[in-house]
């Protein structure tokens, strides 16, 4: 049985299609942090962005290309020279660069969006691949909206781009319209009907509009696809893309039947999912497959009894395998710096010197505020620290008075250019007053669009985790902050979004 097992390549597009999720904007530092984690996770290809789309995207693709080694880095490009040139420039220092060229092939896209005839699309596709080939050998061509394209024309395009040098051809279900039966058949037809198909890998890219992105990707793999394009937590345009963790665990859990596996380091799945959720501000559905909070919880007595007697009665996957460990009380206020460092290593964080000192001081402070320090608290503390530099406005302190039948008053201290600014404001509620005070310091260009609060761990003294979305000049930026004081967490989240808006709009 094992002899037939083959590997499917995982092309991660969290940083490109995933970042196209409404309201998500990541800065270059966050993107590099994610790319490094994706490398640890063992993805084969990271789509780092769309270099031509903005100077920020170009810089992020370039920074990622220079920060990872053991993974291919791709940049998206329309089938035009300007885009391809920018992609090549951004990837110049990548160890393994890939240029990903796309052009739509469906009648509806060609006629209404591109206003091109099929012959023009065919010629432009070939020209683009030939041009990209000057910069690297590794060229992926995507026939956008492939699933709704006419099969004879699609075959013609696929054959022509392979002849022109494409080494991967991607056949997306761009609008999430396919069913598994049709999509599997569609891939088989390409596999069997394009004469030079063995010179390129077949890739699939499924959107989740009808909730079938993972099922469609699996059907494609069973019919000849060798690469699958996914995002962590399934984020992406509209209803998102096929979720990496679901696809990978489906292939692994059902490997005896499917005979496919991936290079993914499964124990990094939970950590990667948490990081993406944190940095994008996109909370996970509680019952999300594989990585949701409830994915391994058993509520009914019959199920609990079964699991206690024999885990496999109700569990088809092992939570430890994907890196979910029970949160244990582990260190307290008497723990030393070394024990703290070693424990962080166990959680995947290598901190030394000044960074370790700052984290350790934060931990000691937290010990005074909270009875039990759990792994989730430490992760929140260290993640926040790792991502909070380049701050234009740095939170310093807050004091709030509020109560029933009273307006709230907030006094907020923020450090700007090494100088403390302290202002007070009155409003209906404490968060409102706090944000009104911050607005006096930062100006009135920032509009709060969304505010979410949750707790990092159970218990009355838990860290509050606040995620906000702030609109600045028509663009949305996500901010996050945590503290055992909910108003302080709210102030930090608001300032975090404002700092991101200012640094990303430069
Ligand atoms: O959904 C899609 O078709 C895409 C392409 C650009 C690959 O994202
Ligand atoms: Zn897409």
Image: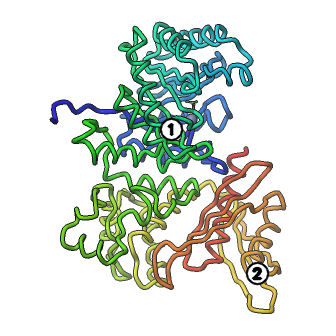
**Residue farthest to the front, as pictured:** 181
Q: Mark 1 points at which residue?
A: 13
Image coordinates of residue 315 in percent, x first then y, are 28, 61
Determine whether, in the image, residue 505 is placed left or right of residue 5: right
Q: Is mark 1 within 8 Å of ligand 2?
A: yes
Residue at figure coordinates x 35%, y 75% from the top left: 300
Q: Under tag 1, what secondary structure?
A: loop
Image coordinates of residue 373 in percent, x first then y, are 40, 77
Please, is residue 69 above or below residue 404 in the view?
Answer: above
Image quarter for residue 203? top left
Mark carried by residue 295: none
Q: Foreground residue, 381 or 250?
A: 250
Image coordinates of residue 41 in percent, x first then y, are 36, 45
Image quarter for residue 185? top left
**Quadrant (top left/top right/bottom left/bottom right) for the N terminus:** top left
Residues at circles 1 and 2 in contact by the CB criterion of under 8 Å: no
Q: Mark 2 points at which residue?
A: 429
Please, is residue 74 above or below residue 310 in the view?
Answer: above
Q: Does the residue labelled 2 lie within 8 Å of ligand 2?
A: no
């Amino acid at each position: 049985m094992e002899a037939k097992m083959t590997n499917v390549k995982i092309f991660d597009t969290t940083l490109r299609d995933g970042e196209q999720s409404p309201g998500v904007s990541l800065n270059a530092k966050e993107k590099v942090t994610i790319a490094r984690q994706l490398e640890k996770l063992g993805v084969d290809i990271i789509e780092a962005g769309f270099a031509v789309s903005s100077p920020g995207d170009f810089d992020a693709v370039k920074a990622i290309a220079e920060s990872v080694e053991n993974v291919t880095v791709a940049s998206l490009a329309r089938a035009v020279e300007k885009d391809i040139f920018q992609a090549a420039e951004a990837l110049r220092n990548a160890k393994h660069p890939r240029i990903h060229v796309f052009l739509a092939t469906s009648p509806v896209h060609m006629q209404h969006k591109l206003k091109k005839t099929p012959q023009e699309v065919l010629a432009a596709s070939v020209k683009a691949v030939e041009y990209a080939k000057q910069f690297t050998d590794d060229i992926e061509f995507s026939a956008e909206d492939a699933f709704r394209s006419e099969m004879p024309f699609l075959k013609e395009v696929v054959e022509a781009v392979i002849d022109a040098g494409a080494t991967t051809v991607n056949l997306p279900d761009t609008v999430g319209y396919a069913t598994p039966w049709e999509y599997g058949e569609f891939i088989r037809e390409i596999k069997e009907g394009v004469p030079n198909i063995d010179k390129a890998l077949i890739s699939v890219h499924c959107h989740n509009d009808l909730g079938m992105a993972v099922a469609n990707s699996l059907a494609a793999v069973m019919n000849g696809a060798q690469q699958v394009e996914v995002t962590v937590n399934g984020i992406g345009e509209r209803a998102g893309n096929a979720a990496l963790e679901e696809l990978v665990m489906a292939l692994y859990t059902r490997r005896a039947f499917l005979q496919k596996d991936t290079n993914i380091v499964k124990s990094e799945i939970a950590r990667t999912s948490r990081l993406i959720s944190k940095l994008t501000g996109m909370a996970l559905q509680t019952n999300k497959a594989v990585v949701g909070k409830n994915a391994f919880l058993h509520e009914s007595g019959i199920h609990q009894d079964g699991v206690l007697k024999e885990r496999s009665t109700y569990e088809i996957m092992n939570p430890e395998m994907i890196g979910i460990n029970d949160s244990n009380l582990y260190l307290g206020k008497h723990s030393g710096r070394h024990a703290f460092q070693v424990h962080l290593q166990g959680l995947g964080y290598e901190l030394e010197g000044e960074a370790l000192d700052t984290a350790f001081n934060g931990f000691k402070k937290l010990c005074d505020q909270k009875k039990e320090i759990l792994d989730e608290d430490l992760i929140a503390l260290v993640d926040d620290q790792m991502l909070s530099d380049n701050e234009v406005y740095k939170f310093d302190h807050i004091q709030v008075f509020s109560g029933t039948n009273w307006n709230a008053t907030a006094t907020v201290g923020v450090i700007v250019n090494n100088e403390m600014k302290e202002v007070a404001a009155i409003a209906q509620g404490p968060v409102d007053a706090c944000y009104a005070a911050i607005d006096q310091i930062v100006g009135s260009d920032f509009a709060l669009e969304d505010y979410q609060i949750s707790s990092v761990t159970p218990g009355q003294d838990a860290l509050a985790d606040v995620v906000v979305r702030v609109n600045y000049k028509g663009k949305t930026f996500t901010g996050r902050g945590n503290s055992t004081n909910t108003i302080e967490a709210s102030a930090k989240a608001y300032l975090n979004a404002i700092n991101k808006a200012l640094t990303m709009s430069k």
